[in-house]
Amino acid sequence: MKVLLVNGSPHKTGCTYTALNEIAKVLEEEGIESEILWLGKDPVPDCTACLSCRRRGVCVYNDSVNDIGARIDEFDGFVFGSPVYYSGPTGAICSWMDRFFYTYSSKLARKPVASVVSARRSGTTATFERLNQYYLMCNMVVVGSQYWNNVHGSKPEDVEKDEEGLQTMRTLGRNLAYVIKCMGTAQEVTAPRVEEHLWTNFIR
C-alpha cells in the first residue's frame, strides 16, 4: 500500500511539507508507504484545452503529470497540499491538477484522497474547498479529519507549534490509512485511534 503526497508549495521543506510529513509519519506507523512529490519552483504549464490527451492518453506537456499518470496504479491514495495564495491554492498546483485530473480522471475513480492547506492566518477554507472540487467530480473517496485540514504558520517552526493543526494531520493520516485498508480487504479492520481533541487558537 502506498500514498502519494503532492507538495504544491515553491518551498520544498516549508509549511506545506511539514503538514504532509506529519501525515507521512502516521502512514508509516500504519504500515503504509508514502512518497512526497514536490512540484518545484519552475513554471508549470497550464492546460490549453488542446484535447491531445483525449487522443493520446497522455498530456501534451511531458512532465511529472505524465510521470505520475503512468504510476497511478502504484498508489492506493493521494493527498494534495498547497499554501494559501490570496484565498486559493498556488497557480502551480492548480495548473498541475487541471492537467492531471483531465488526463487521468478515469484511473482515479474510487481512490481515497484528501487536501491539506497551510496559511499564515486565513484563506484556508476557500483554498481547501477549491482543491476538493477536483475529487468530487472524479468519483474519488474524499477522506476527512477532525477539523478542516489546515495548519498555520509563516515558517515550519510555527507549524510545529500548531498542536491542533498537527493533530488534524495525524487524524487525517489515520483515517486515510483506515479507508485504504477497508477498501483493500474483506477482513475486519480496526478503527483509527482517536486522540483527545486539542483546542487551540492558531499556534499559541
Image (cartoon, rainbow, N blue to C red):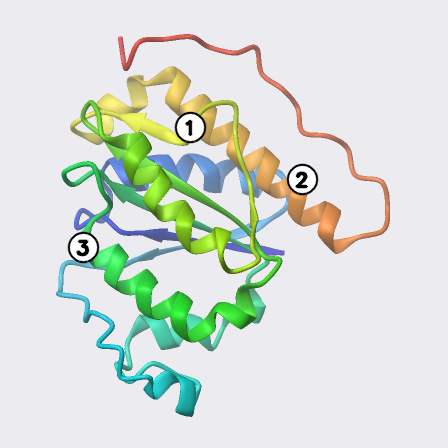
Q: Residue at x 49, y 51 (%)?
A: 136
Does residue 51 sit above or below 27 in this rendering? below
Quote the CA–CA distance across marks 3 and 2.
32 Å
Number of numbered discs visible in the structure rendering: 3
Q: Is residue 113 above or below residue 20?
A: below
Tell me the CA gap for discs 1 and 3: 21 Å
Q: Nearer the viewer, residue 33 or 5?
A: 5
Residue tagged 2: 178
How far across and down, in percent of the image, does residue 72 sit?
52, 69
Residue at the image position 36 percent from the left and 35 percent from the top: 19
Q: Earlier in the sequence, mark 2 or mark 1?
A: 1
Residue under pointer 1:
148
As drawn, is 186 to the left or to the right of 19? right
Asked whether residue 76 appears in the rendered view, the answer is yes
Q: Which residue is mark 3?
A: 91
Could you say whether the residue bearing mark 2 is in a helix, strand or loop?
A: helix
> Which tag is nearer the camera, tag 3 or tag 2?
3
Cα gap from disc 2 to disc 1, whole angstroms: 18 Å
Residue at image x 66%, y 43%?
179
Q: Residue at x 46, y 38 (%)?
A: 23
Quarter-of-image position of residue 21: top left
